[in-house]
Amino acid sequence: VIEHVVDPEKCDEIRRLWSTTVKPSKSHLYRQATARAEQHVYNDNGWVMNPILNLQSVDPSEFETFREYAVSNILTDASLVGLMSDILGEPPKVVQSMYFEGNSATWEHQDTYYLDSEHIGAMAAAWIAVEDIEADAGRFFVCSGSHKIDMGLQGFGNNIADHHEDYIMSIVEIIRQQGLEIHAPILNKGDVLIWNSRTIHGSLDSQSEDHSRSSITLHAIPQSHRFLQLQNRIMRLDIREINHVQIHQPKDLAFLRNRLILGVEAHFPTQFYWAKSFAIRTLFAAKSLFKSD
């Protein structure tokens, strides 16, 4: 945990832009928990409970000011970039980001199951508090030292399309069996928590009616590394350089092609996500067959 990394005024401004531009929107946006195109889900307090995915890729025709401020002032903040450079050993390449407002729970997991550097375990992530995170606001937690535990790689038997819940339960069981301690540190506005892609982490389940959990998460790999998805597939990156930092913009909605794909996802979700799951199963089945041969 590093205190006072991001200027509190930047935190206030990104929250203001969220409240005035993103939060009132009725559009479909990609979501952190599902990676699917969904509309906002609000709780009784009016907080958005399904966090958005990849601030750097939201539609600039609707969210231009929010998008550009998030990229130029938060994701590429000089103090944060310097910190990530020290940890990664070279400049960071930002491959994913998220924005949280409501205090929804995030299940226990390792980031590497979903994304990582091609050199597994070389990715780092940062959780940036953009408001003071109160004790009952579903604070972020880590199991310190858990990055040293070899949990194997994603394969046909535990792939995300068919066995995601089994994977989550296996992480819970490891925490129980090994008696791992859960640490949910205090983070105030502008503070940052950094962890390794193999570290077990999540956020506490909170039903607080008084405190939100406004925060931004980013994941970064060393600039010279390639990006690995689902521990099986090297992905081509759509890079934009901002403040001398490489930012990957997946499904960038500045482009018509990606807006059309989003429209299909939004209006034909059953068919689209069945096809997506089928493609993932096929990938892992082919990998399994190749290894057996």
Image (cartoon, rainbow, N blue to C red):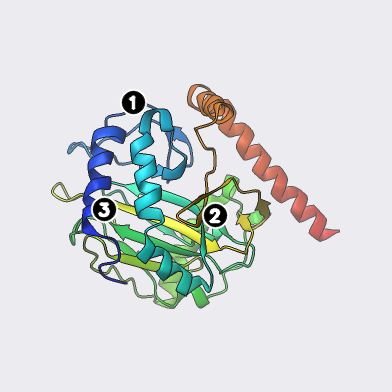
To which residue does mark 1 refer?
26
Q: Do the residues labelled 3 and 1 touch (CB within 8 Å)?
A: no
Q: From this viewpoint, which residue is outermost toward the left?
A: 210
Closer to the chain start, of discs 2 and 1, is 1
Quadrant of the image containing the C terminus: bottom right
| Residue occupying the point 29% across, 61% down | 6
Which three-letter amino acid code belongs to the residue tagged 1?
Answer: Lys
Instruction: List the residue tagged with mark 3.
Output: 10
The residue where tag 2 is placed is 114
Q: Which residue lies furthest to the top in this view?
A: 267
In depth, the one of 93 and 135 nearer the eye is 93
Residue 58: percent from left, percent from top: 43, 37
Compared with residue 191, is residue 210 higher up or lower down, i.e. above or below? above
Q: Residue 232 carries which label?
A: none
What's under tag 3, amino acid-wise?
A: Lys
- Residue at the (61%, 39%) spot, across then down: 277
Residue located at (63% from left, 67% from top)? 119
> Local crowd at mark 1 within 10 Å, few (<14), some, or many (≥20)?
few
Residue 147, compared with residue 81, is above or below; it is below
